[in-house]
Image: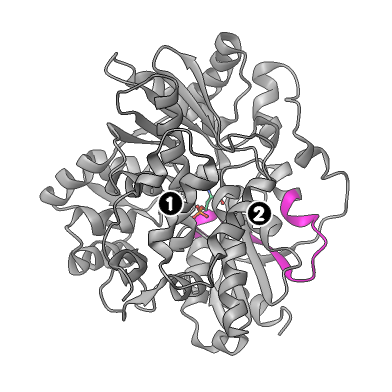
Amino acid sequence: MTDAAARYISTRGDTTPTDFADALLRGMAPDGGLYMPSAWPTLPAGATTPGQSYVEIAKAAMAPYIGDALPEGALDRALQKLVAGFDDPAVTPLVQLADDLWMLELWHGPTAAFKDLAMQLAAALSEEALAASGERLTLVTATSGDTGAAAVNAFANTAGIDLIVLHPLDRVSAVQRRQMTTVEADNVLNLAIRGDFDDCQRLVKGLLSEESLRERGRFSSVNSINWARLAGQIPYYVSAAMQLQAAGESRAPTFVVPTGNFGDAFAGIAARKMGLPVAGFVAAVNQNDALARAINDGLYARRAAVETASVSMDVQAPSNFERLVFEASGRDPAATRAVFEAFARDGQTSLPADLLVALRAEVSAVSVDEATTRAEIGHAYETWGKVVCPHTAVALSAARRQLNGSGPVVALSTAHAAKFGKDVVPVVGFDPDPPHVIRALGDRPERLTVIEATPEAALDAVRGFRS
Ligand SMILES: N[C@@H](CCOP(=O)(O)O)C(=O)O
């Protein structure tokens, strides 16, 4: 019998429980909710034995979520492929910046952003899941820059899988856009949407519930609405804790996570649910602060996203907030449904007082403005000689406010600064040295199609692609 951690239920409570492979190939639950493991597994000893490699940690941490849903050895093969694409032996090295202040570098992979860690696995595991059934898979994915780049890299030219990426027109960095649009792959379609990331994510969710598209075969998403994306982000929290221990630090860390769609932060919360000792989580958002206002003021309200230097976090309706509400409500699907149906219908909803207390026990949230982000890029360079991207700067600014001598604070560094030259160069005064994966982009021509942010336009584009 499959363990509870490998059975997936919906946050909205109206879906037949299913296994990892099906949750992976569906992306979202049919009732409009998000898949969650029906119970949290305990972190196996293999993940926390000193001296383990990233592959060993990830295998132990992820296997309970997969159970027997994939062919024998699928996770091993996926992990070997993942680490082969990283340019650091630690995969996600932890760097000390000052007393109690650490930075977890998550950008040593093929698109120089943290998304590679789960996306490369999602691609390999999707292929394994499809090999057994021989089905065809179409993926639709919304991006504010990094997810799309990682998805294109991971899925380009994969037999049996088509990938359609929706990014907000002119609202991703030039490098992010070129990582998506210069790849020569007939199975990839780039759609530039006249709107913001939240429009892209809304269109993706609409497409996933569009029955007429089922003719194409399986239809899913590789946004962090897909549980497999979160499962692939849990191991680096465990790895960071192990690296701290190896450095002689025995106190539990506080993780500061630069936050957009809240998938990364929720993966950390999942690691803690599995038993990883963590003192706290801080979600650091930019001026798009819907999540911070919800947690700090109790009002979850939709506003148009503003453009910031940390473009990948220009999100005002963070999808994984639904998973947090589900968990904080004691896994109550009716309470979760009430919050997100009201938000969808009215554009805002007040969170009940008891829910708010439980949310704050899981995570705190701070918003960092643009001037502070710029100042933090300068501070990181002047103080530690580190050229950091704007997202990392948001995290570092929030992390430095957490330092109170009570334990280590780990800021997640989510992307290489060279992806965001427009905002980094004016502060540090030079072009950050790009890793070879960015240099290799060269000046190849770009391929993208511009469409309006309407369900009809999105549906037409998808129907017209390789059907
Ligand atoms: N920050 C993201 C937005 C989508 O996030 P995801 O984790 O749900 O894929 C991006 O860079 O696209």
Quarter that holds the N terminus: bottom left
Q: Are marks 1 and 2 in contact (CB under 8 Å)?
A: no
Judge whether residue 305 can be spotted in this image.
no
Left or right of 295 on screen, residue 248: right
Q: Residue at x 40, y 50 (%)?
A: 303
Quarter that holds the C terminus: bottom right
Q: Which residue is mark 1?
A: 60
Q: Is residue 100 above or below residue 88?
A: above
Residue nearest the observer in this picture, 216 or 46: 46
- Which badge, 1 or 2, comes first in the chain's sequence? 1
Question: Residue 62: horizontal and vertical position, in percent?
Answer: 44, 55
The label shown at residue 81 is 2
Q: Is residue 23 magenta?
A: no
Residue nearest the observer in this picture, 265 or 172: 265
Q: Residue at x 36, y 67 (%)?
A: 6
Question: Residue 131: horizontal and vertical position, in percent?
Answer: 62, 78
Q: Which residues are magenta?
A: 179-200
Label 2 sits on a secondary structure element that is helix
Q: Is residue 388 above or below residue 127?
A: above
Label 1 vs label 2: CA separation?
17 Å
